Image: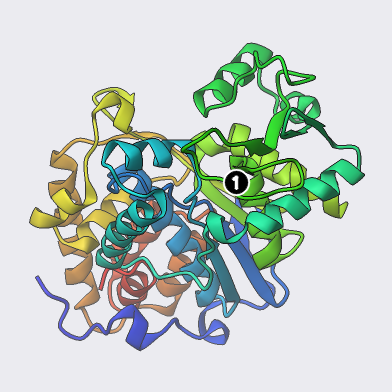
Amino acid sequence: MTLPSAASAESAGPARRTDLVAPGAALRLRGDRLPVVGTARLYTCGITPYDVTHLGHASTFIWSDLLASVWRLCGVETVGCRNVTDVDDVLTRAAGARGSDFAQFALQQEYAFDKDMTALRVRRPAHEPRARHYIRTVQQLAEALLAADRAYVRNGFVFFRGAQVAADSGLPREVALARSAEFGDDPHDPDRDDPFDVAVWRPSAPGEPAWPGPWGPGRPGWHAECAAMALSVLGSSVDVLAGGEDLAFPHHAYQAAMVEAVTSVAPFARARLHVGAVHRGGAKMAKSTGNLTLVADVLRDHSPATVRLLVLDRPWHAQWEYRPGDLDRAAARLELLYAAAGRPGGAAATTTAVVTALLDDLDVPLAVETALTDGGEAARLLLRVLALA
């Protein structure tokens, strides 16, 4: 069923704050109130462009897109930044296996990602910094960390002192070490003073991407790339730091610690949107496990609105198991929403209740159920905010 009178979210625009949102109303994330004065700054950890986009990737970006949409509903100007990690060993290896230059290969993969995001109605953020354009900025970050005695130089590396970062994570030591190793750190590296120290700058071997630097030719460390890009684009702090839940430690923990160490502004992020992992066959969806569900594949048989509702109709922080039949159930629920939106009128109280649900931890399931009970304007508003129409 097609909603006959619903305009697109882009053409219709968000409902006016004075119509729907009480003065002083603020978004809550995990129970914490997040008022915004002026502009909301949203940093979303983007892709390492070495492979096609799967449903697990897409989930993070759809939720980040919804957060920005809810802020706009409140009349809050939102500045989004979604980085591209196009300097990374995984990318270099993937490009080499295909006989491609790493930068050219990254651009090809980024094009495919952008195509998938456009199909899923994920708005392009205002800023999309690429790591290879911020090499000097990472070097400045390293110099500032050295000046603050939060880093040291050894054998061409600049290492950030990370023992306190691991201690503050609340993770058992062995779990923290395992997570660091999972993301490419080597806790047993004899060059490090502590297993949790991480590279801000690292020397490059022949054939690896390299740039001249004060400590010799090399390339940035992953956590330092995001710290430098966030600082350059959004300043010393952000309102929300978003990404998959697996980025909480080590990546986001080190990114925040580096920024705080050089700016003395804490916390770096007022709140964090760590989106629950998507599983298939009992394991997290990942290339290493071979259980990927590609966005391009599901969009062959299902509408973008169906895929968005599949992702959003659950708590954002919850892990979930994907089953192909879930798409059919999401499509049926979407049809109910369209039918509800086609009904005339609608009580103002229901529309307010939908907005209240979205402001309270982005509670989409409650907002959907509320809109279905009365239909009309409440359902039409929800379709616009969720980008389902």
Up-down: is 34 above or below 102?
below
- Left or right of 291 in this view: 179: right
Describe the colour scheme in one phrase.
Answer: rainbow
Q: Tag 1: residue type?
A: Arg
Q: Which residue is the site of mark 1?
A: 30
Snapshot quadrant of residue 159: top right
Q: Is residue 95 visible?
A: yes
Which quarter shows the C terminus? Answer: bottom left
Q: Is residue 265 visible?
A: no
Up-down: is 91 above or below 124?
above
Nearer the observer, 267 or 107 = 107
Marker count (numbered)? 1
Up-down: is 164 above or below 144?
above
- Left or right of 258 in this view: 120: left
Residue 40 location in percent, x, y? 64, 69
Residue 331 location in percent, x, y? 15, 55
Residue 194 location in percent, x, y? 77, 19
The kind of secondary structure element at disc 1 is: loop
Q: Residue at x 44, y 81 (%)?
A: 14
Up-down: is 63 above or below 74?
above
Nearer the observer, 52 or 284 = 52
Q: Farthest residue toward the front? A: 206
Nearer the observer, 359 or 301 = 301
